[in-house]
Amino acid sequence: MRNLRKLTLAGAATALLLGATACGTQANGTAAKGADAQVPAAAQSAAADPYGYGDGGASPAGTASGPLGVRTDATLGQVVTDSAGFTLYRFDKDTAKPASTSACAGDCAKTWPPVPATGTTAGAVPATAVASFKRADGAEQLTVAGWPVYRFAKDTAPGQTNGQGVGGTWFAVTPEGKKAGQAPAAALPSLSFVENKTLGKILRDGQGRTLYRFTKDTAWPMKSACEGACLDTWKPAQLVDGTKVEGIEPKRLVPYTRTDGSKQLTIDCWPLYWFTGDQNPGDTKGQGVGGTWFAVNPEGKPVR
């Protein structure tokens, strides 16, 4: 847009994008004609002790029902716990996709008791990450991001992590369903593009989440049509530091003031959002939802 090019960065190497917009007067009415066309988560020998049976002295451990907790361990970082504070684990031989399955039964399940879904609630873990599946014995087992979760019989007090790395296959589970204590991935830019095998290059935020446009929004005047219950599912993208973006001209990123006074990131004056249904970095489950939500290409347009 011609007017957008008139934007200047105050201290191009520093500031958060909090300046005035050149996207037209923000309004609660309909868009002006001529706006951009709307289209629609210490290893033992696996061979010697694959399940951590050790000397066989472990006694069965139950899991406290109630809300899940999240504890920050000094070594492992964030780990999920049961309501009594006992660490919960995931098993590499299980699967999370395309369906949750458990490879731990019989003697294994005595040392690693499956966490029952009945009576257990998400608590401090994102509700969208918590679900359950039916084991071979018919019991419902809790999952985090699709991964079945377990207690460890040799954890005899809250806060212990004796199961970490056992057999090279057991790890404390993070709130995102990942293995705790793993080396963190390289930090992403605050905003960048990534190549998606289906959609091509699409916009993502610093957490690797796909960003979307809503075709009911307008750019001139700049306005979001996602309010009320819509915001339970579609979260406004936060403002970013213009010096920490990659592959995008900072002047294309303008703040939008929402009706509640909060600030939302836009590209070329179009508000940006992330989708609560995307549970892992790179997910694009929001693509095409309702025929009105689409990922964003390098030109700032919806990907169709």
Image (cartoon, grey):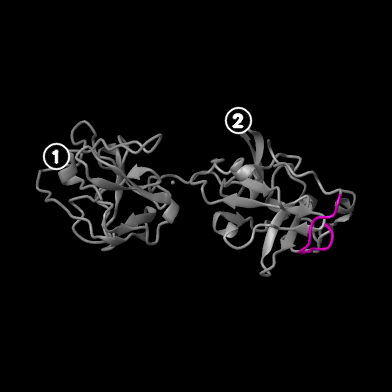
Disc 2, SS: loop
Is residue 14 in view from this perspective?
Answer: no
Q: From the viewer's perspective, is the residue at label 1 or at label 2 nearer? A: 2
Residue 134 shown left or right of residue 232 in the figure? left
The disc at residue 107 is 1
Residue 30: x and y in percent read 79, 58
Any mark on residue 198, and which? 2
Asked whether 8 or 267 is in front, the reply is 267
Three-letter amino acid code of the residue under disc 2: Thr
Residues tagged 1 and 2 counted as in contact (Cβ below 8 A)? no
Most foreground residue, 107 or 232: 232
Which secondary structure is most common in the magenta stretch? loop
Q: Earlier in the sequence, mark 1 or mark 2?
A: 1
Mark 1 residue type: Asp
Q: Which residues are magenta?
A: 23-33
Residue 94, quarter of picture: top left
Q: Secondary structure at mark 1?
A: helix
Q: Report, in whole angstroms, how far the alpha carbon at label 1 lies from the one at label 2.
A: 44 Å
The answer to whether residue 199 is left or right of residue 150 is: right
Q: Position of residue 195 (x, y in %)?
A: 63, 34
